[in-house]
Amino acid sequence: MNEETLREVTILASQIAIRICEQKKNEWLKEQRDAGIQKIKWILKEYKIMMQYEKEHPDEKANISRIVEHNMGVDTVEYIIFVKERFDIALRILKYACITSGKLEEERCYQIISELYLECDGQRDNYLRGEDKISMIADKYNINKRTVYKDINKASSILATLYFGILN
């Protein structure tokens, strides 16, 4: 192999290696972003329970760990309280951003998250689950169920960015 061919092979191999590294980095970033969004959705699903417990036991912060599943590695009361307080801040920012945007779609996005995960409306909240609740919200806003899911995903993505920081 002559020197010119060796140089071309080296350049080509370097370009391929760089491309593969960039692809792996992008895959890793996507996995991190998806994991963050899934954690936000988990917090949203558990949020009513945390709020209800906090309302019923304002001085009993130590027992809050009983209401949280340990599958996320959460095992200290201080961390759970930190998660909830930090999530409350992210929710306030999301609410402010959506309401002040002047766009009906943005406002609806927050309202849907609020109705699904933040507000507890008594008996109806106890028996409406999953698809029934999604259908009820879709009917209320005169939108397709798929749009409700898109709004949930959009809000979860924004909350993940607010909660975890900028995720590319």
Image (cartoon, helix red, strand yellow):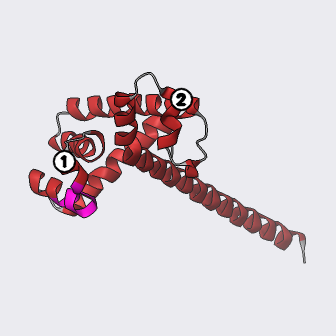
Percent from the top left, x then y, of residue 10?
81, 66
* Residue range of the region highlighted in magenta in the rendering: 127-135
Q: Main secondary structure of the magenta part?
A: helix
Left/right placement of residue 65 relative to residue 50 reads right
Give neighbour class at mark 2: few <14, some 14-19, many 20+ (Cα, 10 Å): few
Q: Which one is nearer the viewer's eye here, 18 or 5?
A: 18
In the image, residue 29 above or below residue 107: below
Look at 10% across and 52% down and name the residue there. Answer: 140
Give how far apart the Cα atoms at labels 2 and 1 are. 28 Å
Look at 22% across and 56% down and name the residue there. Answer: 127
Percent from the top left, x then y, of residue 92?
33, 29
Percent from the top left, x then y, of residue 97?
28, 32
Q: Is residue 122 magenta?
A: no
What secondary structure is found at the residue carrying circle 1?
A: helix
Q: Is residue 129 magenta?
A: yes
Q: Residue tagged by mark 2?
A: 62
Q: Earlier in the sequence, mark 2 or mark 1?
A: 2
Residue at the bottom extreme of this rendering: 1
